[in-house]
Image (cartoon, rainbow, N blue to C red):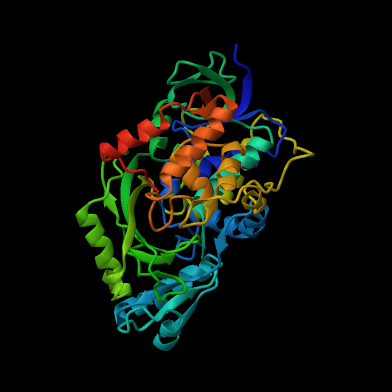
Amino acid sequence: MDSLRDVVVIGGGVVGTAIVRALSLYNMSIMLVEKQHDVCEGTSKANSAIIHTGFDAKPGSVESDCLRRSRELWPELIGALKIPFLPCGAVMVAASETEKAKIIEHYVPNAEANGVEVRYIEKEELLEMNPDVSEHNLGGLVIEGEGICDPFWVTRAFAQLAELNGAEIRFGSGVERIEPADDDSHLVIVLEDGSEIRTRYAVNAAGLWSDEIADMVKDESFVITPRKGQFILTEDTLGISQIVLPVPSPSSKGILAAPVVFGGFLLGPTAEDQEDKWDRSTTDDGMEAVLNGVEKLLPGIRSATTIRQFAGLRAVCSTGDFVISPSPRSHRLIHAAGIRSTGLSSSPGIAERVVELLRSTDLIMTERSEAILELPDLLGESDAASNGEIICLCRSITRGEIERALSAPLSSTTLDGIKRRTGAMLGECQGNGCIPKLLDVMESFTASRGLAKAGGEEAPLKGLRESYIAGQAGGRDNEI
C-alpha cells in the first residue's frame, strides 16, 4: 500500500510550487502532483512577469494581505533563489483630467491603505523617464516598488528547492477524483493512471481547474472562469524605462508595455472571457486589440517588429477574491484558488498563509534543522567555460548550459523545458536557428545516459526530432 503523505499539493504553477517549497522546510512527507510534464505549464508561463506591490488591490481583501506579506518576503527570496529581477518601477499614466482625478482620488489613497509608497509626477518628469510615452498624457503615478522577473525561473526554483529538501514531485499526474477515507483520517487522491496517493491533507492549487478539484469533494463554493490575455513580444528598442500602465478598467488592469528581464519588451494583455480552459490561441483581433491599447500609451508602437505572440489564461473567481481556506465540504482539502492576475506577485504570501492553515490542524510541523534555504548555482558561468560551443546565437547559450539544464534537479527533456531553463529559443529568431542544434545536444546527452526522464517516468528520447518536425508540419507552435 502507498505510504501516507502529510500533504499533497495539487498543481505545479507558481502558487503550487511556492507552497511546496514552504512546506519542504518542515519535517513532513510532501508531494506535488502536476497534470502536465513540467512545472509552469499554465498561467504561470504566460503572464506579464511583473512582481506587483499591490498598490491597487482592494484594501482588506485576502489578495491585498497576501501581496503585502509578499513584498516583505521577495527581497530575500530573489537573492536565495537567484531570481533574475529588474527593479524598474512602474508608472500609471493619466491621459485625461478624468483619469488624473481617478489616480489622485482613488489610487493614491488606495496605495496608502495598502502600505505602498507612490507619488504623482507631472508630464515633464514622465516624458523624461519614458520619452516614447504619448505627449498628450498629463502625468502619472509612479510606483517605485514594482519590478520585472523571470516567471519561469521563479516557478522552477520554488520546485527545485522543495525537491532538494526531500519533497516528491510527480509530473504527468492529473487528478481523477478525491475520496475521503472511511474513518475521515485522510484523503485518497486517485490519479488518471489509476494510481492512488493517500494523504492527511491536500492543497488545491490547480489554477483554472481549482473549481473542478473542489467539486471532487462536492464543494461548489466557487466557480472559475478563464480569461484570455494575448501578448506581443518585441525586441525593438522602446523609449521606456518603467512598466507603463493605463488606468485600469473594471475587468482588467489594462493593456501595458513592460521591459522583459532577459531582453525586449512585452505588450498586452487583452482580457477576453471564454469557456474553454485549454484555448490559448492568438487571433488577429487580439493582436489588433493589443496594438490599439499600447498605442494609447506609446504612439509609435506600430513600427515595432513583433518576434512572438502568445496567450495565457487567468483564473477569474466568482467570489471576487482569493480563496485560501479549508473547503467547507472537507477540512482536509485546503484551497489556494481564485488567483487571477497577481499569482506570481503574491505567491510567497499565499504559501505562508497555507502553511499557517496547516499548522492549525493535527499535523505535527517541526522546522527542518538542515533545510536548504538557497538554491545552488545550477546554471552558472562555469558551464560556458566547460563547453563553450554556442548553440543559441541570439542568447549566446552554450552547449554546456544546455547539458547542465538537462542534468539539473527537476530537469526537462522537452524543447519548451529547455527554453524556459536556459533562455534558448527566446531570442529574435525564436528557435529557427538553434532548434536543430538543440535537438542534437539533447539526443546526444540522453543517449549517453541511455534513458531520458519524461513525464515523471524514464522513457527513451527516440523520435524527438521526428516529433518536432511533424509538429511543425501540422502548424503546432511551441508556446513561450
Query: Residue farthest to the right?
Result: 369
Front residue (pair 396, 246): 396
Left or right position of 480 against 66: left
Asked where in the image residue 407 lies, by quadrant, the reply is top right
Left or right: residue 301 compared with residue 148: left
Viewer-proximal residue among 177 and 360 = 177
**Which percent across, then down, holds residue 406?**
56, 38
**140 shown above or below 449:** below
Where residue 451 sits: x, y (%)? 55, 25
- 479 or 204, which lies in front? 479
Quadrant housing the N terminus:
top right
Looking at the picture, how far across and down is residue 392, in whole percent? Answer: 48, 52
Residue at far top of view: 1
Residue under the image location 32 percent in, 74 percent down? 298
Q: Residue furthest front?
A: 389
Q: Residue at x 48, y 38 (%)?
A: 440
Tell me the residue at 72%/42% (across/down).
372
From where the camera sits, is residue 339 visible? no
The image quarter in which residue 207 lies: top left
